[in-house]
Each structure stands twice: as structure tokens, then as C-alpha cells.
Image (cartoon, rainbow, N blue to C red):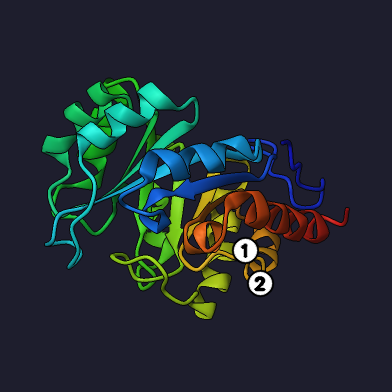
């Protein structure tokens, strides 16, 4: 489902469509295949985000490469792997091999972001750079030529179901302005995204919306239309 931004919000070098990404961190861990299919069947969800956590960069543990491999077998969704790990560099080849379409590393990780982004490119995958809520956007300036996606976290990474941090909205707008006409294709937001917060982040310039708890609190056949309606209203439709 194409949800195009208005010309006022468009960046000519960035993707003009609003993309919904299903975070499987918000799904039932014993029914991931079922929940992924329900999201995909809505036809409005185009991406799936796989959050990978190591228990060091975040206090939680989550999915590994084999989950990505199974998703690629069962789904046609674009696979966005978000590495919330301290040492992502050694993990990049295996996630690329298992089928990730885009791999996002954190600016704050121990491995240098530039080296990780260069390796992701070498592996033939789209590149993403993520920022914690307290990391200033302007610290990414020199890395912009290396990335396809900039992710602004709107919760502290680690757990599903957290409350949206309102103070991040100006940061999303700042990121959109920083990207300008020469920035990455995608400006992604992740954390507390719902019908209530969608207008704030879309108006600020985000074009990839990662939705977990708000997507899976009911069957996606009921929640997704409400999310789409929030996007359309924000875009003046």
C-alpha cells in the first residue's frame, strides 16, 4: 500500500513513501510465523524488523541469524536486521548470508561504525545507522554518505512495549533537516510508535515506522487499518 508523503514533506533524494515495518519483538515468541503472516496479509506492512540483542549493549537477549533465514523462507517482506549489540562487526557476514536485506548497527557500539557500514556495503546489503535517544544527530554527519537508513530510537533500546519519548520528536525533525537532499533514502523511527505518535513522527519527517506492541496488541487485521488511517490523516488524505 503506497502512502506517499506530500510535496511539502518530501526530500527528493529520499524515499517518499511511508513504510510500515513489523517488529517481531512485539509478536508472540511462540507464534512468530503466524504473527508475521498476519502482518504480511494486511498488504500494508512491507518490512519486518528483527531486533538482535546480546545482553551487553542492551540488558535483553533476542533473535539470531536462523530466525532471519526462516523469515526469508516463509515471507516476501523486506528484512531489516537491527543489531543492538556491542560488537556487531563479526556478526555482519552471517546475517548477510542468512538473508538480511538491510543491516543496521548502532553508532554507540564498540566496533567503529564506519568499518561496519563499509563491510555491510561490501556484503551487498543496505546499510543502516541507529542512534540511542541521547545521542546527538549531528554526530553522524561524516557517516551519511555510507548509509541508506538513519534510525532514530524513540525509546531506549532493549524491550518491547516502552513508552514513546516525546523529547525525541525534535530530534527526528533535526535528522530530517540534516539529511536534506543528499541524505539516505530512509529515516526510520522505532519505539512506542502507534496511532497517537504516528502524526508526530511523520510530520517531523520519518518515512519508515517500526511498529511492535501497537501492531500485535490485537490481530493486525484490526490494528493495521488504524495505523494506516493515522498516516493518511497526517498526510491530509
Image quadrant assignment for residue 117:
top left
Q: Which numbered circle lies on residue 196?
A: 2
- Tell me if residue 183 can be seen: no
Front residue of 125 and 43: 43
Q: Residue at x 12, y 62 (%)?
A: 56
Callout 2 secondary element: loop
Q: Which numbered circle lies on residue 87?
A: none
Q: Residue at x 41, y 51 (%)?
A: 141
Query: How far from the left and from the top, in percent, is residue 97?
Result: 23, 22
Q: Residues within 10 Å of mark 2 (few under 14, many from 20)?
A: few
Comes first in the chain, label 2 or label 1 = 2
Q: Residue at x 81, y 52 (%)?
A: 8
Disc number lying in front (2 or 1): 2
Marks 2 and 1, how far apart at CA:
10 Å
Residue 177 lies, with reference to residue 6, above or below; the image says below
Residue 182 lies, with reference to residue 160, above or below; the image says above
Front residue of 145 and 226: 226
Front residue of 81 and 75: 75
In the picture provided, is 194 more to the left or to the right than 91? right
Query: How far from the left and from the top, in percent, is residue 29?
Result: 31, 52
Query: How far from the left and from the top, in percent, is residue 121?
Result: 32, 26
For the view shown, which residue lies furthest in the right direction? 237
Quadrant in the picture for the N terminus: top right
Residue 93 lies, with reference to residue 219, above or below; the image says above
Residue at numbered disc 1? 201
Amino acid at each position: 500500500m503506497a502512502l506517499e508523503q506530500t510535496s511539502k514533506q518530501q526530500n527528493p533524494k529520499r524515499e517518499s513513501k511511508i513504510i510500515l515495518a513489523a517488529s517481531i519483538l512485539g509478536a508472540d515468541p511462540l507464534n512468530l510465523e503466524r504473527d508475521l503472516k498476519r502482518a504480511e496479509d494486511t498488504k500494508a506492512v512491507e518490512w519486518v524488523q528483527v531486533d538482535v540483542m546480546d545482553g551487553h549493549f542492551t540488558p535483553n537477549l533476542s533473535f539470531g541469524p536462523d530466525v532471519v533465514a526462516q523469515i526469508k523462507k516463509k515471507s516476501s517482506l523486506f528484512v531489516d536486521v537491527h543489531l543492538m549489540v556491542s560488537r556487531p562487526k563479526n556478526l555482519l557476514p552471517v546475517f548477510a548470508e542468512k538473508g538480511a536485506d538491510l543491516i543496521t548497527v548502532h553508532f554507540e557500539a564498540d566496533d567503529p561504525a564506519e568499518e561496519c557500514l563499509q563491510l555491510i556495503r561490501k556484503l551487498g546489503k543496505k546499510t543502516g545507522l541507529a542512534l540511542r535517544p541521547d545521542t546527538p544527530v549531528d554526530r553522524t554527519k561524516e557517516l551519511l554518505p555510507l548509509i541508506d537508513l538513519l534510525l532514530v530510537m524513540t525509546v531506549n533500546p532493549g524491550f518491547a512495549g516502552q513508552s514513546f519519548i516525546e523529547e525525541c520528536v525534535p530530534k527526528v525533525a533535526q535528522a530530517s533537516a540534516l539529511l536534506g537532499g543528499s541524505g539516505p533514502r530512509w529515516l526510520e523511527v522505532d519505539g512506542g510508535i502507534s496511532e497517537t505518535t504516528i502524526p508526530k513522527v511523520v510530520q517531523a519527517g520519518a518515512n519508515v515506522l517500526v511498529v511492535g506492541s501497537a501492531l500485535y496488541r490485537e490481530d493486525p487485521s484490526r490494528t493495521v487499518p488504524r495505523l494506516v488511517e493515522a498516516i493518511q490523516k497526517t498526510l491530509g488524505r
